[in-house]
Amino acid sequence: MAANRGVSPPIPALREAGCTICLGSDNNNNDMFAVMRVAMLTERIRRQDEHPGMFPQPEDILRDAALGGAQAVRLGDRLGLLEVGRQADIIVLDTQRPHLVPAGRILSAWLHNGQTSDVESVLVDGEFIMRDRRILTVDEESILAEASRVGKRVWAEVEAAGPVEPPGRTGWR
């Protein structure tokens, strides 16, 4: 979804035409929870269904994120589904959180109300990269410190170059 830019792609028409729908976290906050939630709600708003809010279901959105993403990068035969012979990427959620209880369908509760802090563990290709809410593969503290240093340097250069006006906003500040 390009909602941050005020764009709502014609996903219902694209689905109807048989296009692969995929979701990505390459814009702003990199939060797949937010991406899936916005995709679901935006498509529901855009649709002209007789019974609003029934499509897409959370299962459709999870499929778009997992299998649709794998198909978009031409790896649909190896990724995107939990099946024998495919690489297994799994997230483990703590479903006993106040915002997820009670839940008749945990996937629905998670997409409507979930938070990134609900993720307890992550396995990629069968290997833990996060366990008990601790990232195991990188030094998170040093990465955050470096990102902060780089961000401050970049913004200082932007500010030194003069005011930046968004397109169509003269005299903005």
Image (cartoon, rainbow, N blue to C red):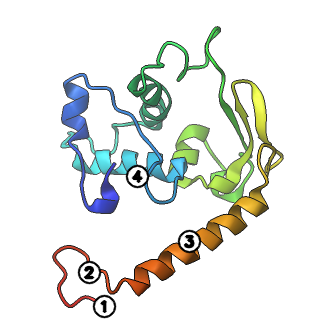
Other residues around mark 4 within 10 Å, as few (<14) / some (14–19) / many (≥20): some
Mark 3 lies on residue: 151
* Label whose residue precedes the other's in the sequence (1 or 2): 2
Mark 4 lies on residue: 38
| Helix, strand or loop for disc 2 | loop
Is residue 62 toward the left or the right of residue 54 in the image? right
Is residue 78 toward the left or the right of residue 159 in the image? right
The amino acid type, in three-letter code, at marker 1 is Arg
- Residue occupying image coordinates x 31% and y 52%: 2
How far apart in space, not on screen, are marks 4 and 2 (Cα)?
A: 27 Å
Mark 1 lies on residue: 173
Where's residue 55, x and y in %? 33, 37
Q: Are marks 3 and 4 in contact (CB under 8 Å)?
A: no
Q: Are marks 1 and 2 in contact (CB under 8 Å)?
A: yes
* Label whose residue precedes the other's in the sequence (4 or 2): 4
The amino acid type, in three-letter code, at marker 2 is Glu
How far apart in space, not on screen, are marks 3 and 4 (Cα)?
A: 27 Å
Residue 54 location, quadrant:
top left
- Residue occupying image coordinates x 42% and y 32%: 64
Is residue 8 toward the left or the right of residue 116 in the image? left
